[in-house]
Amino acid sequence: MKIDDALSLTADVLWMDESMGRELYAFIMKARPKRILELGFAYGKSTVIMAAALDELGEGMIDTVDLEVTREIFKDPSIEDLLKEAKLSNLVNVYREEHSYTWWLKKKLDLQIKGSKIVPDYDFCYLDGSHNFTVDSCAFSIVDRLLRPGATLLLDDLKYSYGQMNARQGKSNEPPPLTIDEFDGRCRVARTRMSEDELQAFHVAAIYNLLIKTNPDYHRFRISQKSNWGWARKKGGERDARFGSGPLAWMGAMKSMMRRNS
């Protein structure tokens, strides 16, 4: 499916805008990931756009994970409705968890244990879920084990803060009275009072800057979409093996080209 068709089909669906959709689609077309992991799908707009690119490439599969409550919160349309309308359901496995996608990731680790090692399974991960440091720092630590060498990681909403979002939506920074099984729908965890610095902090940016950019196993860091998207690539894979990953990697690529043309 062409990008214009995917954008037309999802034009009235929240929340990914056209610029984001085109950048995500272009990345899939260039990187050609065969296995994609998406954490947080809401209505499924980003899922459809990625699946459309895989459809155009003729190969690939997406595992997308969110919460059971999305059946009620995000149902007009649901992700299943969108995928069916786009005729892309065969390219996506939709999973819903009761509490958190970190538990789904735990179960995925169980499946990937071969002997005493975890065999990575994904070439690309798009993380757009809880926007909560506690939840998504755990998610990253598990996703890291599931990403193949050379895989790409994309984090959305680097500039999200609970305080600013509450102000924008006219909500109080005070947590609701806590009753059994009463949760914050954004991260599906019991919402206790946050300190002022936690309310105003950019949780996803903290994960990107403190846990990913300082991780020696990642490089090729890039910010896009008005500083809302953070990209990183896991070292290794075919390109790094051929050209290396350091500041002089371009020289290896140039020498290789010269040898082929000589």
Image (spheres, rainbow, N blue to C red):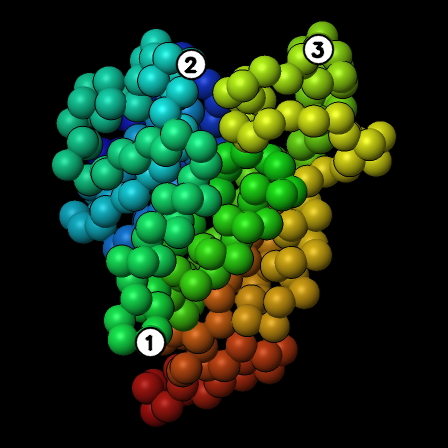
**Tag of residue 116:** 1
The span from disc 3 to disc 1 (Cα, nearest Å) is 48 Å
Determine if residue 215 is in view. yes
| Foreground: disc 1 or disc 2 | 1
Residue drawn where x is 64% and y is 58% of the image: 211
Question: Along the horizontal axis of the image, is 259 left or right of 216?
Answer: left
Query: Few, some or many C-alpha atoms within 10 Å of disc 3 (few <14, some 14-19, many ≥20)?
Result: few
Observer-nearest of 246 and 199:
199
Q: Amino acid at mark 1?
A: Ser
Q: CA distance from mark 1 to mark 2?
A: 40 Å
Q: What residue is drawn where x is 18% and y is 50%?
A: 59
**Disc 1 element:** loop
Give me the residue at 68% from left, 40% from top: 203
Q: Position of residue 191 (x, y in %)?
A: 64, 25
Q: Looking at the rendering, which quadrant does residue 232 occupy?
A: bottom right
Residue 106 percent location from the top left of the image: 39, 51
Q: Secondary structure at mark 2?
A: helix
Q: Nearer the viewer, mark 3 or mark 1?
A: 1
- Does residue 11 appear anywhere in the picture? no
Mark 2: give few (<14), some (14-19) or many (20+) Cα within 10 Å: few
Q: Amino acid at mark 3?
A: Lys
Q: Earlier in the sequence, mark 3 or mark 2?
A: 2
The residue that label 3 is drawn on is 171
Q: Which residue is mark 2?
A: 73
- In primary-sequence order, the first of circles 1 and 2 is 2
Residue 67 lies left or right of residue 54; in this view the side is right
Q: Residue 197: horizontal and vertical position, in percent?
A: 83, 35
Q: Which residue is rendered at x = 39% and y = 16% of the image?
A: 74
Kindly report the distance in space between the C-alpha atoms of the residues bearing marks 3 and 2.
Answer: 18 Å
Nearer the observer, 198 or 1: 198
